[in-house]
Image (spheres, coloured by chain):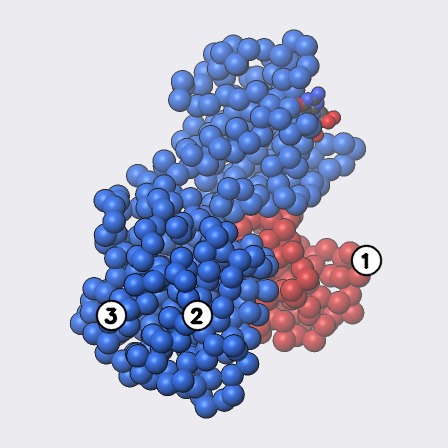
Amino acid sequence: MLRFGIPTIDDEVGWIPDGSRILISAAPGIDLTPFGAHIAVKASENGMRAVYLTNNKPGTAVRREFDFLGFRPNGDFVIVDAFSGIVGLPSQEKVCVGTPFEPASVASSVRDASDGGGSVVIVDSISSMIDVCGMSPTQISGLVKEMSKKSTVVALFSNWHYGEEITQGIAQGFDAVVNLWNVEEITTMKQMMAISNVGWKKVRQTSVPIKVLRPGGLRVYVPKILVTGPYNAGKSSMTRAISTSSVSVDRMGTTVAMDHGYLDYNGFATEVFGTPGQEMFDPLLAYLADEAVGIILVVDSTAPGTFPRAKDMLARTRALNLPLVVAANHSDKPGAKPVEEIRAELALPDNVPILRTVATAGSGIRDVLDKLMKRILEVNDK
Amino acid sequence: MTETKGEALRNALKKVTAVHGVVGAAIVARNGLLIASELPKDVDERRLGAMTATMMGAVETAGMTLNKGSVRRVIAEVEHSTIVATGAGQKAIMVCTADNGVNLGMLMLEMEDQSAQVRAILEG
Ligand SMILES: Nc1nc2c(ncn2[C@@H]2O[C@H](COP(=O)(O)OP(=O)(O)O)[C@@H](O)[C@H]2O)c(=O)[nH]1
Ligand SMILES: [Mg+2]
């Protein structure tokens, strides 16, 4: 069986029953190839054969996209070339559709390629079936249904303002519709994903911001996580520990500008901004904290003298209005204060997790990230 | 079809990168998140963006500490490059990297025009 491999969407939808038909419908201008590639990789990770039907670009372009994203499907991967037949060029692929304009011919090539079943057919794209091949929604539904007899079908659809009738007609042939659209705010441009009309399960309407990492593939996108806390608490060590790659602007062993890292964790991608700890840098705190989606407050649990400063930094970064997790760091050292004492000193509500960590050894880090991501998604949901 | 905000911003950046000696340019939110970029592939654009915001923030604070008003631009000369950053409205910064031999006067004029453009696109 197949899974989307995208947190929150997976939580809602779960495993996709074999033979399901899924439409990925995108606003004009959104490149759908990475989504197709993502599905192919997920298929392959789950031991299924990925059959990539392309009618809008040559097979080499599909492979190039895979390389670009750093994808190497490790199972069976077959390209079914319906493009060469359309443009009248010789095909480089093993499987080539004889008459791409005819649903029966497409169905037969796909059937050959997905021989034995247990495969996922990625249809790239429905739009070209309409625009270039002149197929009607009814023909397309029939073709998709035929393919789903042996395989799960994931079809890509750039919705170039086709109008209600065609859009509806296409959607009717599917068991679930994934919608993709762009959101533009003053300084952010993000892509959103939501799933609806799921036939095999009752789902809540959830939408998540997503991002295509190159290399890497699809991730849930969390723009900014802030790591803050008093001088020497372990903020730079924490940023380093949670990031796949990071830098720190340090002079004489302390951070004078910021730490910056990239975090790619459990299907989430985010940037980590670490603040300096000393009061003299407080004016920078406001810039760094702006638009943070979640905060990790790092405290040295052996230094209660710094707790008032930690409390002050929570106020300066408006941390209590955001998903917040406290890392009770330096917990490997003697004299580390118990978590409840820290909670009382910082006057933190019970729902703020306080977790013991050793940033330099990386221990407790996963817990911090798991709790933080969970809280970010809960807020996102409202 | 009308151009998207992202395209409009990249077009403004292309006018800056067209100046002789300019290597790349980007628009960054004052909070450090990248908005649009026309930087070479090998540049870590998000990191450059984050550092640009911190640099502007620090200079802004220095200016306020001196009581001498707000920042017009920041010019940093590093060994093999010149970095110029200027405000582009309330929310954003335009940053540009150039060869050390760049005609700064020309570059600053173009950045002034295009940052006004960017401001209009973002806040318009
Ligand atoms: N024993 C111990 N040392 C730590 C821990 N976290 C950080 N350190 C050390 O504490 C010092 C300050 O850490 P740093 O990350 O620079 O703190 P920052 O000022 O908050 O950025 C460094 O010498 C770190 O190696 C920890 O959990 N346990
Ligand atoms: Mg530090």
Residue A214, percent from left and from top: 57, 58
Q: Number of numbered discs present?
A: 3
The answer as to whether callout 3 falls within 8 Å of ligand 1 is no
Task: Tell which tag, 3 or 1, sits nearer the viewer.
Answer: 3
Q: Determine which quarter of the picture holds residue A361.
A: top right
Task: Tell which tag, 2 or 1, sits nearer the viewer.
Answer: 2
Q: Do the numbered discs 2 and 1 sit on residues whose CB atoms are within 8 Å?
A: no
Residue under mark 3: which chain is it in? A
Q: Is residue A56 visible?
A: no
**Chain A drawing hue:** blue
**Residue at numbered disc 1:** B79
> Hey, what amino acid is under mark 2?
Ala
Quadrant of picture, ligand 1 = top right
The verdict on a common chain for dots 2 and 1 is no
Residue A147, percent from left and from top: 32, 67
Residue A122, percent from left and from top: 40, 65
In the image, A298 versus A59, the foreground residue is A59
Question: Which numbered circle lies on residue A113?
Answer: 2
Which chain is represented by red in the image? B
Q: Is residue B48 shown left or right of residue B91?
A: right
Residue A198, percent from left and from top: 25, 52
- Kindly report the distance in space between the C-alpha atoms of the residues bearing marks 2 and 1: 57 Å
Residue under mark 1: which chain is it in? B
Location of residue A366 with respect to A195 vertically, above or below: above
Question: Which numbered circle lies on residue A141?
Answer: 3
Q: Quadrant of the C terminus of chain A?
A: top left
Location of residue A4 with respect to A248 vertically, above or below: below
